[in-house]
Image: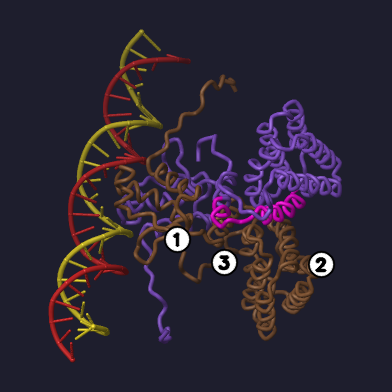
Chain colours: A brown, B purple, C red, D yellow
DNA sequence: TGTGTCGGATTGTCGGACGATACTTCGCCC
DNA sequence: GGGCGAAGTATCGTCCGACAATCCGACACA
């Protein structure tokens, strides 16, 4: 540890493809190009930036990957609004690599669920309440099918997220949901009475939301999540074990 | 709307560069290559995948951009753990584009702050408590400098995040913090007594954390955030206005 | 030990090329 | 005149080959 004086900042030259990406990104974020508007073809960008097409391509790939630009049917590039799922899956991947534990996830999910359902109780629209009702009705007949119930559970929570009318909460909550699906399916396969309790909790939550009863909404959300924890521990897993990629929802839906 | 029978799923071929990225990503997430281990040079990947170097480059750029692979000093590619800031800045950008409101952000921040400081009160280490103490001591002499106080405020909250020992919460909270910095600076410039109140709140929060007093920690975190809201409204801004890229913290630190 | 030099490896960037595919235009036929 | 199919055009995905800049390691030298 010779403690050298740190006189200079580390030198760091930015490659051209990054500059291309940053230039476009800045223009978009500052509102210079609005979502839906075209960016221009690769050839045009080549002319404007004065770099090779390969370089331009490497640059726009980054933005395309982030979902802030997209190809339209023409194949032309246009600004677009990034989808939540894209961000959420990024975050989930990071969490898997960091080997965060189920306990960390559980703690965060608890805080976010509370806030989300509170928002839902305050602001849910009739349409969303109807959708939740429908979800519950579809759940009742398939209580014996863990995968189906887990799927509907996931949908139910997604609906609550929408009902909260708070996109920041939705965004923050999504990673927990991604992992929730697989573990819920696992739990329901093992804990037979789990599905019935889950449905009951959903019913009570919806009821509270319908009445704008924030207190009871929170109460049942808390119980619901507590059930999840107990069930999870009953499957023989510990909360302190790191989450694993097996819990990542497979991308059956192709795309990406 | 001729409602054709939908016999087949829409055909959709994935470009080669995406397949390259997915192949490497899958290998990493499944634990086939652990963080720190090398991926191989571009030339090697060209041979393995049987595609052109340009294609390989477009593929690895994506993973590099996500932060799950990085170039070492050799310039060779190696698996790495994505940094939180990278994910957070992605998320923040998305929120700006979606034009989420300060209210949404405030609501989420409230829920997350509560959970975070509760965790900090339970699990803060002596080192982190010392760091927070140090932060407070550095704040006192610069109360007149909005930018400096905002900077230290941001650091303080980051320390609380670390002290919570919950990386999921840290990840979820970071976007709110990114936006908090600029608005806090703005507020402190306008509301003169703001800095003193902020420091007082920090003191009480640290005190509660030190004593493991979750209740008071939550209480002061709530007050602190309420102060922020009141201050924000006093600057003439409304909570219901969308956040804007001007509130994005500039990247003075270069890098990325 | 510290420094100058050299060769090899690897990346960033370039220029050009080709086939595939989607959009456009145009002429033909009813 | 309008619908329809064919040709033309635009754009992208992929490939090839190339070169300079830079970094690493080794080696000689003081």
For the residues tagged 3 and 1, is the chain the same?
yes
Question: Residue at point 63% right, 60% down?
Answer: A167
The kind of secondary structure element at disc 2 is helix
Can I make out residue B23 in this image? no
Residue B3 sits in quarter: bottom left
Q: Residue A36 versus residue B56: which sits nearer the camera? A: A36
Labels 3, 1: front one: 1
Task: Please tell me how crowded label 1 is: few (under 14), some (14-19), or many (20+) other residues with Cα within 10 Å.
Answer: some
The residue tagged 2 is: A219
Task: Please tell me how crowded label 2 is: few (under 14), some (14-19), or many (20+) other residues with Cα within 10 Å.
Answer: some
Task: Please tell me how crowded label 3 is: few (under 14), some (14-19), or many (20+) other residues with Cα within 10 Å.
Answer: some
- Disc 3 sits on a residue from what chain? A
Cα gap from disc 1 to disc 2, whole angstroms: 42 Å
The residue tagged 1 is: A36
Labels 1, 2: front one: 1
Range of magenta residues? B93-116
Cα gap from disc 3 to disc 2, whole angstroms: 28 Å
Can I make out residue B191 in this image? yes
Q: Residue B191 versus residue A177: which sits nearer the camera? A: B191
Checking the image for residue A249, the label placed there is 3
Marked residue nearer the N-terminal end (3 or 1): 1
The kind of secondary structure element at disc 1 is loop
Question: Residue at point 64% right, 55% down?
Answer: B101
Question: Vertical placement of A18 versus B99: above or below?
Answer: above
Instruction: Tell me which secondary structure the magenta stretch mostly adopts.
Output: helix
């Amino acid at each position: 540890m010779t403690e050298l004086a740190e006189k200079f900042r580390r030198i760091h030259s930015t490659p051209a493809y990054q500059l291309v990406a940053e230039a476009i990104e800045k223009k978009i974020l500052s509102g210079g190009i609005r979502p839906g508007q075209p960016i221009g073809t690769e050839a045009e960008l080549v002319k404007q930036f004065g770099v090779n097409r390969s370089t331009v391509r490497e640059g726009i790939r980054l933005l395309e990957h982030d979902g802030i630009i997209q190809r339209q049917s023409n194949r032309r590039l246009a600004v677009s609004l990034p989808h939540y799922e894209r961000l959420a899956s990024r975050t989930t991947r990071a969490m898997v690599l960091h080997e965060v534990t189920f306990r960390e996830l559980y703690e965060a999910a608890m805080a976010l669920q509370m806030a989300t359902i509170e928002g839902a109780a305050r602001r849910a629209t009739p349409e969303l309440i109807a959708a939740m009702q429908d979800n519950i009705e579809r759940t009742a007949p398939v209580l014996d099918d863990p995968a189906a119930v887990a799927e509907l559970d996931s949908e139910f929570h997604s609906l609550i997220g929408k009902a909260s009318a708070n996109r920041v909460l939705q965004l923050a909550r999504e990673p927990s949901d991604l992992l929730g699906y697989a573990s819920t399916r696992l739990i329901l396969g093992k804990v037979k009475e789990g599905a019935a309790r889950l449905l009951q909790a959903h019913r009570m939550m919806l009821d509270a939301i319908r009445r704008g009863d924030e207190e009871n909404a929170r109460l049942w959300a808390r119980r619901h999540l507590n059930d999840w924890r107990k069930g999870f521990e009953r499957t023989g897993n510990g909360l302190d074990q790191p989450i694993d990629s097996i819990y990542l929802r497979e991308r059956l839906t192709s795309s990406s």
